[in-house]
Image (cartoon, helix red, strand yellow):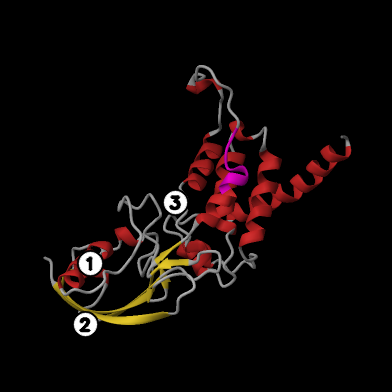
């Protein structure tokens, strides 16, 4: 049976990356606990607009937990208090009546605030552009069973491919590191036969780009805890192993030219 919550929101408001920010206190009475967190924000915005005030800017798209755009820090936790859940899949029944809920954008230098709760995560795009692809010949697609892939390998690749690029790992990391995101993007290609041709060029290019934009990993493990897809930090170890091998192999290839 649903119930109504009377909440107080402390929402970060900021006009742009160079503008000073502040917390605004906004009353949110009569919130149905079956609403998702983003539906609650929709209702609050409707009320703000009806009162002639500016709506809260936040990012969203699919609202099905697969696009990664619903990136919010809620009460100091990436995506909120429910483990393995994106903000759009978090429901208000996780909050107590009368609670004060603090809502902030991701806090990372590589993710500058666009406005209010929306940040620019295009730094992730630079990493993917550096090597997050395979080269495939044109022509007819080969039969699915032409390239045998052991099930444990396929399962691990799918686990890595579950990354939605939300940035929670960066926001939760004390160093604002992006190793979990990068290792997931590297891993799901480097584990599969189709990714072997560019394996070492890929990992070197993506890791070097990552290091230019983000902090360095010191194995706190907060990234795995914050990840809405619960991606394992084991992928970071696999990426580091491939990166060391890439530095050796790529250096040998250059020395032959």
Which percent across, then down, holds residue 134?
59, 34
Relative to 205, residue 43 above or below: below
Q: Marks 1 and 3, Cα distance to the nearest angstrom? A: 23 Å
Instruction: Tell me if I can see residue 122 in this picture.
Output: yes
Q: Callout 1: helix, strand or loop? A: helix
Instruction: Tell me if I can see residue 232 in this picture.
Output: no
Left or right: residue 90 versus residue 212 is left
Name the one closer to the observer, 120 or 146.
120
Seen at 56% across and 24% down, the residue is: 147
Query: Residue 98 — which label?
Result: 2
Quarter of the view holding residue 9: bottom left
Left or right: residue 183 versus residue 58 is right
Q: Callout 3: helix, strand or loop? A: loop
- In this rendering, the count of numbered labels is 3
Seen at 19% across and 73% down, the residue is: 52
Query: Residue 244 — which label?
Result: none
Marks 1 and 2 in Cβ contact (< 8 Å): no
Name the one closer to the observer, 87 or 254.
254
Q: Which residue, given by chain and number where applicable, does mark 1 sit on?
A: 40
Label whose residue precedes the other's in the sequence (1 or 2): 1
Quarter of the view holding residue 15: bottom left
Q: Which residues are magenta?
A: 128-134
Seen at 49% across and 46% down, the residue is: 159
Residue extending furthest toward the top: 140
Which percent across, then down, holds residue 112?
50, 66
Left or right: residue 81 versus residue 93 is right
- Crowd rating for badge 3 (residues with CA inside 10 Å; few <14, some 14–19, many 20+): many
Q: Which residue, given by chain and number where applicable, does mark 3 sit on?
A: 164
């Amino acid at each position: 049976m649903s119930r109504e919550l009377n909440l107080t929101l402390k929402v970060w408001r900021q006009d742009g990356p160079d503008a000073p920010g502040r917390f605004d206190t906004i009353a949110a009475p009569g919130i149905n606990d079956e609403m998702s967190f983003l539906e609650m924000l929709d209702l609050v915005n409707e009320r703000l607009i009806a009162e002639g005030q500016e709506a809260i800017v936040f990012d969203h798209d699919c609202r099905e937990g697969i696009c990664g755009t619903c990136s919010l820090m809620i009460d100091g936790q990436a995506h909120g208090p429910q483990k393995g859940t994106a903000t759009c899949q978090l429901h208000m029944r996780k909050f107590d009546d009368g609670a004060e809920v603090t809502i902030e954008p991701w806090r990372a230098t590589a993710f500058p605030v666009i406005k209010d709760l929306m940040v620019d995560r295009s730094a992730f795009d630079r990493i993917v552009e550096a090597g997050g692809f395979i080269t495939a010949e044109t022509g007819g697609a080969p039969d699915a069973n032409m390239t045998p892939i052991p099930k444990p390998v396929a399962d691990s690749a799918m686990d890595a491919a579950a990354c939605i690029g939300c940035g929670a790992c960066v926001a939760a990391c004390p160093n604002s590191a992006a190793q979990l995101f990068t290792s997931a993007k590297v891993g799901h290609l480097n584990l599969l036969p189709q990714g072997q041709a560019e394996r070492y060029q890929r990992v070197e290019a993506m890791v070097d780009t990552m290091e230019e934009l983000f902090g360095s990993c010191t194995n706190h493990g907060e990234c795995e805890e914050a990840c809405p897809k619960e991606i394992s930090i084991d992928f970071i170890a696999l990426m580091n192993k491939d990166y060391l091998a890439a530095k050796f192999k790529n250096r040998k290839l250059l020395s032959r030219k």
